[in-house]
């Protein structure tokens, strides 16, 4: 599902809301999650999962095409851990 499909589905299920308002709500939620993660904060959505940022240390890597060693800088990457409710639904338990 892509963002526009999510917006359309929410708008269809809530006919009392204008699509432009639903779009603004969805964009605000994504912006807030992104802003929180960029500050290094953890975002937890109960039953769904938790978004956090993990730090990957600098290392020496290898170019797979040439075999040449390259230095890979330290970086921060997004990480998502599923919540119990989501895991159970995916496994047909709920």
Image (spheres, rainbow, N blue to C red):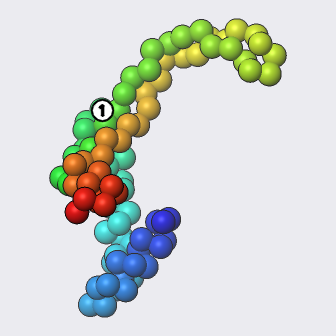
- The kind of secondary structure element at disc 1 is loop
Seen as rendered, the residue at the extreme right is 66
Image location of residue 62, percent across then percent down: 68, 14
- Residue at position x 54%, y 16% in the image: 73
At label 1, counting other C-alpha atoms closer than 10 Å, the crowd grade (few under 14, some 14-19, many 20 or more) is some
**Left or right: where 44 falls relative to 67:** left
- Residue at position x 44%, y 20% in the image: 56
**Left or right: where 7 falls relative to 51:** right
**Quadrant in the rendering for residue 76:** top left
Residue 56 visible in this rendered orientation of the protein: yes
Residue 39 visible in this rendered orientation of the protein: no
Residue identified by numbered label 1: 40
Seen as rendered, the residue at the extreme left is 46
Image location of residue 63, percent across then percent down: 73, 18
Q: Relative to residue 32, is residue 53 depicted above or below?
A: above
Image location of residue 60, percent across then percent down: 59, 9
- Residue at position x 31%, y 69% in the image: 25
- Residue at position x 30%, y 32% in the image: 40
Seen as rendered, the residue at the extreme bottom is 15
Q: Relative to residue 50, is residue 9 depicted above or below?
A: below
**Quadrant in the rendering for residue 36:** top left
Image location of residue 52, percent across then percent down: 31, 36
Give whichever of 36, 54 is nearer the camera. Answer: 54
**Quadrant in the rendering for residue 57:** top left
Give whichever of 18, 90 is nearer the camera. Answer: 90
Q: Relative to residue 71, is residue 13 depicted above or below?
A: below
Q: Indicate the quadrant containing the C terminus: top left, top right, bottom left or bottom right.
A: bottom left
């Amino acid at each position: 599902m892509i963002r526009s499909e999510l917006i359309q589905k929410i708008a269809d299920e809530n006919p009392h809301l204008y699509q432009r308002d639903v779009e603004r709500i969805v964009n605000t939620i994504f912006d807030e999650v992104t802003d929180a993660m960029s500050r290094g904060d953890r975002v937890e959505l109960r039953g769904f999962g938790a978004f956090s940022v993990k730090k990957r240390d600098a290392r020496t890597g290898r170019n797979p095409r040439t075999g040449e060693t390259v230095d890979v800088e330290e970086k921060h990457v997004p990480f998502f851990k599923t919540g119990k409710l989501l895991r159970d639904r995916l496994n047909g338990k709920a």
